[in-house]
Image (cartoon, helix red, strand yellow):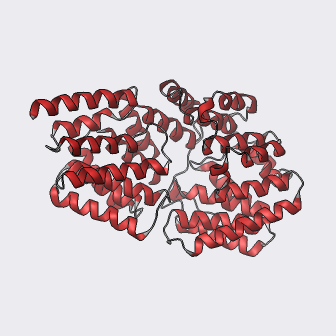
């Protein structure tokens, strides 16, 4: 049995390496011989494959498949600790990303964690599961940090631990420490696609565009058949230099097999929007291959805005009304979690703004931004502030919008001076003296400026 198991592990590691699955995590589990049941181990490896699928990080079906395989592994071996750890992660991600934020899914994550703790309370992998549970399900960053630092002490070179700690430190506003964790993964495993991706993303968010570029290129080199690296390269051009021709070339490099992926469709819609090709953007959004992209609430709002920019005010009003109805209906039955609920409220505020309902729009946008301010969440808060800035712009509160935009430029965020210049949604601000001063300041594209700590940033009171 031991010999057979050793051969299975060797084969599994070779396959995992070819598929881009994080090899060190597999070896850590394999060294401990997690189960005597080969069928359970096979199911576990299938679960690992789905939750480690290279860069397709936001695919709900991957996480459902991962959970199903981990459940099968547990049914074959009820004492399979590593499978419970994987199951905690799968359930927690589905809650955090909004695929299934129900109370039932939260209970399933808690039950898997409780069983893992019961079986191996001191195992570093179980401390990792504790950290991911608190981080993803409850956004309790203090408890998550304690658990993850305990896990890191036990398995200091485990890429999964380092990756999650990098995510956590970004939320806490500790961006240098986040970068250090992602760099450590890449030093240990130079072909780790995800580490390259998150280094590029983190430098980008920190407005350190020149440093982001080589890691985005490395992501493409390591995964040329994936769309994520090309999309991120286009996004970097938008934010760094505003070079729309270079961004278009990056998007045109996406493999044809991935052209209908919702994220690819949305990237092309943004490109056409920035180029002022509103009718083309609408065709892409409404195309036969983009149904899953155009079905989202965010895409409904984008469609409405495109009609508005194209001069079709009646269809714009109808589209905003459709988005309003859909968002209000979703919010009525949605759990009041701290991730998706405020996001939906912010989007509802945009819909109200498009319908001319000024007070409703401001109420929703400000409420969404207040749930997790910058001092509590350095990654989530700027996204809601971006929505709030757009709402203020749409309802004519230009000074309030510029207050928020100045904050977004002083903390890690996706906003940049170049984006302000190429995105027509900010056009109502462009004749404002404060806007003109802002874009002519030393914070030019690519400027590696000082990033203000989130706890030092206070939005002006209106």
84 relative to 20 in the view: left or right: left
314 relative to 75 in the view: left or right: right
- The quarter of the image holding the C terminus is bottom right
- The quarter of the image holding the N terminus is top left
Residue 145 showing in the rendered view: no
User: Residue 330, relative to residue 162: is it above or below?
Assistant: below
**Which residue occupies the foreground of this view, 159 or 142?**
159
**Which residue occupies the foreground of this view, 197 or 94?**
94
Q: How many marks?
A: 0
User: Residue 197, relative to residue 426: is it above or below?
Assistant: above
Query: Given the current orientation, which residue lies at the most extreme right position?
Result: 311
Residue 92 showing in the rendered view: yes
- Image coordinates of residue 342 in percent, x first then y, are 57, 66
Residue at 23% x, 34% y is 27
398 relative to 337 in the view: left or right: right
Residue at 34% x, 45% y is 47
36 relative to 361 in the view: left or right: left
**Which residue occupies the foreground of this view, 193 or 86?**
86
Residue at 53% x, 28% y is 225
User: Residue 104, relative to residue 27: is it above or below?
Assistant: below
- Image coordinates of residue 148 in percent, x first then y, are 30, 51
- Image coordinates of residue 157 in percent, x first then y, are 27, 36
- Image coordinates of residue 33 in percent, x first then y, are 15, 40
**Which residue occupies the foreground of this view, 454 or 168?**
168
Among the 4 quarters of the image, the one containing residue 346 = bottom right
């Amino acid at each position: 049995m031991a010999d057979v198991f050793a051969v299975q592990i060797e084969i599994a590691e070779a396959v995992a390496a070819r598929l881009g699955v994080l090899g060190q995590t597999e070896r850590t589990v394999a060294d401990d011989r997690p189960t005597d049941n080969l069928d359970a181990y096979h199911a576990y490896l299938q679960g690992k494959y789905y939750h480690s699928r290279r860069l397709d990080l936001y695919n709900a079906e991957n996480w459902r498949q991962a959970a199903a395989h981990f459940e099968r592994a547990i049914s074959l071996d009820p004492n399979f600790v590593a499978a419970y750890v994987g199951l905690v992660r799968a359930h927690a991600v589905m809650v955090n990303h909004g695929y299934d934020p129900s109370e039932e899914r939260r209970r399933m994550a808690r039950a898997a964690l409780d069983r893992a703790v019961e079986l191996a309370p001191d195992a570093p992998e179980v401390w990792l599961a504790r950290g991911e549970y608190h981080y993803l399900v409850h956004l309790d960053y203090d408890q998550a940090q304690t658990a993850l630092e305990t896990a890191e002490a036990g398995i200091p070179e485990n890429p999964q631990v380092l990756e999650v700690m990098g995510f956590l430190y970004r939320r806490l506003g500790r961006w240098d420490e986040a970068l250090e964790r992602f760099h450590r993964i890449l030093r240990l495993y130079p072909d780790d696609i995800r580490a390259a991706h998150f280094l590029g993303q983190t430098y980008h968010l920190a407005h350190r565009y020149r440093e982001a570029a080589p890691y985005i290129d490395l992501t493409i080199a390591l995964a040329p058949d994936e769309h994520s690296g090309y999309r991120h390269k286009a996004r970097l051009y938008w934010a760094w230099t505003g070079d729309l021709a270079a961004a278009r070339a990056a998007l045109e490099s996406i493999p044809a097999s991935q052209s209908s992926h919702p994220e690819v469709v949305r990237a092309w819609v943004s490109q056409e929007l920035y180029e002022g090709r509103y009718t083309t953007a609408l065709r892409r959004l409404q195309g036969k291959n983009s149904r899953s992209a155009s079905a989202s609430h965010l895409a409904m709002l984008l469609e409405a805005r495109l009609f508005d920019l194209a001069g079709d005010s009646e269809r714009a009003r109808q589209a905003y009304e459709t988005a309003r109805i859909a968002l209000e209906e979703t919010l009525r039955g949605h759990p009041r979690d701290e991730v998706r609920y405020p996001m939906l409220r912010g989007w509802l505020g945009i819909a109200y703004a498009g319908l001319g309902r000024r007070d409703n729009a401001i109420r929703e946008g400000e409420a969404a931004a207040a749930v997790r301010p910058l001092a509590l969440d350095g990654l989530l808060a700027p996204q809601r502030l971006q929505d709030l800035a757009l709402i203020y712009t749409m309802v004519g509160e230009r000074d309030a919008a510029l207050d928020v935009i100045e904050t977004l430029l002083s903390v890690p965020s996706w906003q940049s001076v170049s984006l302000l210049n190429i995105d027509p949604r900010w056009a109502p601000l462009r004749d404002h003296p404060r806007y003109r001063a802002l874009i002519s300041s030393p914070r030019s594209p690519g400027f590696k400026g000082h990033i203000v700590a989130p706890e030092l940033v206070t939005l002006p009171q209106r």
